[in-house]
């Protein structure tokens, strides 16, 4: 990415693609397993999006106009995801999580494509393993501490935690392969934050401040880390994606070790466990198939483009 990057839309098709990318990002805030950034990579929008975020003040009009369709998509995706996920998690939580993990597994080839053909060296392996250990470590620490997933009786320290979580959630939106909901599950706050939005929200100042802190952290993270990510894409693209691939694998494993899933395991009776596993595993495969199809689509498009260039 450089100063010559073109953020101007050349037609309605490009605007629709950006809306779809934004929709995927908005959906990924709520839906475990979907990576809006991975979709942005497939649609060839990721680098432009990072450039626009990191230069929003420097080139405000150009970047703002580029980001408007993405913003519209984010709002739509977030709203639909919120209603859909609450319904599914209330009725079939484990099966739903399996499906969403399948979506995560399906995005891995998209990320791996960025390092495919790269000479294997110790630095790359260390970055991959280090990235994989981060979400697993967060999950194990959360389990050991016994994360309080209640939003009642919060202390001042909790609100600083929610600002921090907002920053981390912003990272999941600009780093491919990571999921905001998986992150919140690892900390044990996903269900509480999802279920906190209701008729009683505006009558509870403490609850309102939870979401205010999350938004503040999210904005801080986007403005701060988009510049860093943009530089990494320019200077250290391969090492960056080695780390991201590790984070992605670690996140997949961490989902089933997190507090949210542990709470489900505790409620299992023998019949419930058999049903959840017999349905959940096929749904994981279905989720994988859906996002892997995007990878195949991207691969065929690249092959077609190369064929046209040769001719």
Image (tube, rainbow, N blue to C red):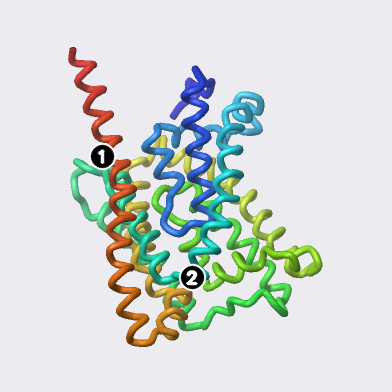
Q: Is residue 194 above or below residue 41?
A: below
Judged left or right of residue 246, residue 93 is right
State the residue in front, 216 or 304. 304
Q: Which mark is residue 76?
A: none
The x and y percentages for residue 162 are 64, 65
Q: Which mark is residue 296?
A: 1
Identify the secondary structure beneath mark 1.
Answer: helix
The x and y percentages for residue 64 are 63, 30
Identify the secondary structure beneath mark 2.
Answer: helix
State the quadrant of the N terminus: top left
Q: Which mark is residue 91?
A: 2
Residue name at image x 73 percent, y 68 percent: 207
Q: Is residue 128 above or below residue 16?
A: below
Q: Nearer the viewer, mark 2 or mark 1?
A: 2
Residue name at image x 44 percent, y 33 percent: 45
State the residue in front, 36 or 297. 297
State the residue in front, 248 or 77. 77
Residue 101 is drawn in which quadrant? Answer: bottom left
Residue name at image x 18 percent, y 12 percent: 311
């Amino acid at each position: 990415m450089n100063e010559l990057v073109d953020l101007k839309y050349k037609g309605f098709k490009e605007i629709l693609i950006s809306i779809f990318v934004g929709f995927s990002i908005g959906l990924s805030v709520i839906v475990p397993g979907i990576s809006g950034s991975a979709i942005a990579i497939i649609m060839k929008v990721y680098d432009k999006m990072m450039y626009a975020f990191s230069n929003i003040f420097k080139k405000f009009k150009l970047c703002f106009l580029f980001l408007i369709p993405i913003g519209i998509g984010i709002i739509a995706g977030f709203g639909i995801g919120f209603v859909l996920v609450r319904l599914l998690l209330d009725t079939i939580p484990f099966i739903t999580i399996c499906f969403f993990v399948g979506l995560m597994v399906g995005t891995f080839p998209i990320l791996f494509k960025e390092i495919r053909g790269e000479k294997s060296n110790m630095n790359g392996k260390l970055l991959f393993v280090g990235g994989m250990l981060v979400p697993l470590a967060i999950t194990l620490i959360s389990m050991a501490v016994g994360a309080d997933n209640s939003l009642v009786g919060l202390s001042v320290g909790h609100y600083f935690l929610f600002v921090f979580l907002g920053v981390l959630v912003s990272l999941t939106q600009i780093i491919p392969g990571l999921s905001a909901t998986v992150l919140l599950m690892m900390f044990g706050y996903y269900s509480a934050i999802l279920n906190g939005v209701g008729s009683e929200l505006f009558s509870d100042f403490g609850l309102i401040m939870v979401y205010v802190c999350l938004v503040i952290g999210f904005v801080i993270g986007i403005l701060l880390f988009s510049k860093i990510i943009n530089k990494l894409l320019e200077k250290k693209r391969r090492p960056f994606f080695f780390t991201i691939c590790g984070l992605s694998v670690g996140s997949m494993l961490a989902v089933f070790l997190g507090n949210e899933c542990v709470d489900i395991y505790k409620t299992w009776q023998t019949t419930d466990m058999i049903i959840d596993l017999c349905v959940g595993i096929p749904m994981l495969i279905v989720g994988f198939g859906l996002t892997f199809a995007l990878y195949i689509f991207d691969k065929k498009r690249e092959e077609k483009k190369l064929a046209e260039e040769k001719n």
